[in-house]
Amino acid sequence: MTMQNQIDIVAFGPEHIDGAVELSRAESWPHRREDWQLVQQLSAGIAAVDANRRLTGTTLLTPYGQDCATINMVIVDKSMRGLGVGRKLMERAMALAEGRPLRLVATKEGLPLYEKLGFVTTGEIRQHQGEVRPLDRPDGVEDMQAGDLESLKALDREAYGADRSALIDALVRHGKIAVIRKGETIEAWAAIRPFGRGEVIGPVIAPDAKTACALIAFHAASRPGAFLRVDTGSETGIAPWLSEIGLPHVGGGIAMRRPSKDNAEQARRKVYALANQALG
């Protein structure tokens, strides 16, 4: 019997979280148990387990209404690579999408497999992180109010092109959200929550880069010296400013879609920072 034949592909559940944390640590990913739990609660997932029921691979799919889904947390144990496990996990996860357009952020190592499965490169995601320098809190930014939630979801649908209501509900529970108003109307917003080594700022939904930077600065200003992370698209133009405030470019990934385009192309507002690379 080959090693591949000893692998079972099963549904990913809470019982796999501890093994998933071990897998991600082996890849030097920063994800805590709580980070895996959040993605698992929002997602359907597939796991590979060996004859001893040890977790050897994961792939999760996070649906956003019927509009699209992200594929994320794709890991195969180093001892299992080259045996087709990653492809099996991806194919099973893609079947869970039930025809939804798919998005993911690829590593260079995963790129060849994703291309074979029909994914097309659409951009670059830049990971910026570090100990943020002291900043003045910008004027015109404030904490969200209880009645703002539906407006946040509507702005996010406009920018992202999909209904991420469940994600935004989770961000409200686990973090804090800042908003910019124009009269009674919310023009832009940004979330911050615990993640990995510190906190992640995102998503950032704004009409322009200046507004996006003001939202990020609002969160960062209350955390001088804290370890913060922002994942932004290379096309947003905010990467140089992030480096200036103490969040240098440390890596990132390749944005991919299947099919190559969907309905978020002409939105008046943009996603200036991701919730993180897994959740988009």
Image (cartoon, grey):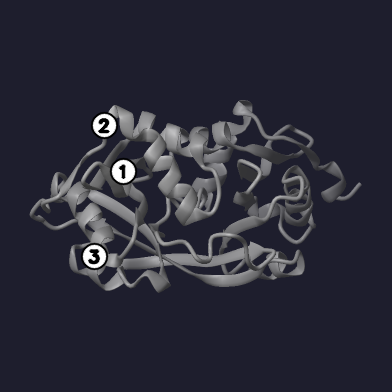
Mark 2 residue element: loop
Which residue type carries mark 1? Ile
Q: Is residue 9 left or right of residue 157?
A: right
Q: Is residue 71 left or right of residue 99?
A: left
Say which label, 3 or 1, has the lower sequence index. Answer: 1
The residue wearing badge 1 is 192
Q: CA distance from mark 2 to mark 1?
A: 15 Å
Q: Between tags 2 and 1, which lies in front?
A: 2
Mark 1 residue element: strand
Mark 3 residue element: helix
Image quadrant in which you'd find residue 195: top left
Residue at figure coordinates x 68%, y 44% from the top left: 56
Q: CA distance from mark 3 to mark 2?
A: 23 Å
Which residue type carries mark 2? Gln
Depth order, front residue of 185/20? 185
Which residue type carries mark 3? Lys
